Image (cartoon, rainbow, N blue to C red):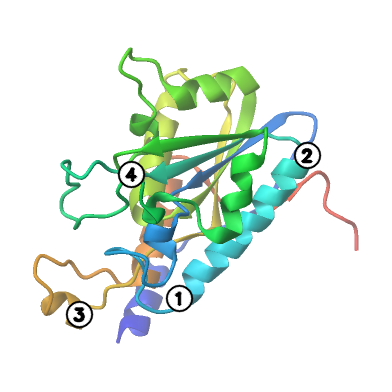
Amino acid sequence: MVSQTVELLKKEIPLEQESVVLAEDTVNGLVLVDIINGFCTVGAGNLAPREPNRQIREMINESARLARVFCEKKLPVMAFLDSHHPNKPEDPYPTHCIIGSDESNLVPELRWLENEANVTIRRKDCFDGYVGSIEEDGTNVFVDWVKKNKITTLVVVGVCTDICVLDFVCSTMSAKNRGFLNPLENVVVYSRGCATFDIPLEVATDTKRALAHPQEFMHHVGLYMAKERGAKIAREVLIGAPEKV
């Protein structure tokens, strides 16, 4: 039934994806959203997957592969890590990713990023990395990062497609359109580098305060809404001219 619904959804709101080639004569930046144990590692916490998940596994693999490419080319990378204080819940979700716990750390496949000079790590205590980058004095770590590195195209990967990734993309597009992020021109969401969680209706029905969250359905909706905000949705991301066949 779920697969039929997803097919109907894709028919009613088809999502055209493109192959994005990043020019090497401009600065491209990569943002990784919440690719941490608490959301991605089986059994790691209240919001972690309960069993291995294909979509999450592909997201980790593709994000790690893309991060390697960016780091090899010494391009700027920013990683947002969901990190909460114990006394500040994030409704409607249960306690998760408490600061100092392993839940709030990068997944093992990405821990190497912590030692890369071109990588900026930003812990945030809210859904939206843009808002989570605001300091007490009103400055914004993400905005400063874009401007300092003169980033013209931003590639976004991570979890969850329809929550933290989408919220960040929406805020970034609005800020770009207001001229707050010059010289940023393009925001690209790499679909295979994104994932969301899965809560079937039958599970949600038997769980207090839980909302149904069919994975493929919400992943598609998240990507579609990001495109509605003006982001490019990429089925593949290449740097430099693609090889001629």
Q: Is residue 192 visible?
A: no
Instruction: Name the disc covering residue 73, or none.
Output: 2
**Label 2, label 4: how far apart the Cα atoms are:** 31 Å
Looking at the picture, how far across and down is residue 16, in whole percent?
Answer: 53, 58
**Residue furthest left in the image:** 208
Sequence-first tag of 2 and 4 = 2
Reading the image, the residue beneath label 3 is: 203
Task: Pick whichever of labels 3 and 2 is earlier in the sequence.
Answer: 2
Q: Please state which amino acid type lies under the numbered disc 4.
A: Ile
Q: Is residue 84 left or right of residue 122?
A: left
Q: Which residue of the protein is positioned furthest toward the bottom in this rendering?
A: 1
Q: Position of residue 10 (x, y in %)?
A: 41, 69
- Label 4 secondary element: loop
Q: CA distance from mark 3 to mark 4?
A: 29 Å
Amino acid type assigned to the residue bearing label 2 in the image: Lys
Which numbered mark, 2 or 4, is in the foreground of this view?
4
Q: What secondary structure is marked by label 3? A: helix
Q: Quadrant of the N terminus?
A: bottom left
> Tag 3: Cα neighbours inside 10 Å, few (<14), some, or many (≥20)?
some
Give me the C-alpha separation between circle 1 and circle 2. Answer: 31 Å
Expressed as whole percent of the image width and height from the top left, the position of residue 56 reads 48, 67
Q: Residues within 10 Å of mark 1 (few under 14, many from 20)?
A: some
> In which image quadrant can residue 217 be found?
bottom left
Q: Secondary structure at mark 1?
A: loop
Q: Earlier in the sequence, mark 3 or mark 1?
A: 1
Image quarter (top left, top right, bottom left or bottom right) of the C terminus: bottom right
Cα–Cα span, label 3 and label 2:
45 Å
Residue underneath mark 4: 99
Which of the two discs, 3 and 4, labels the residue nearer the N terminus?
Answer: 4
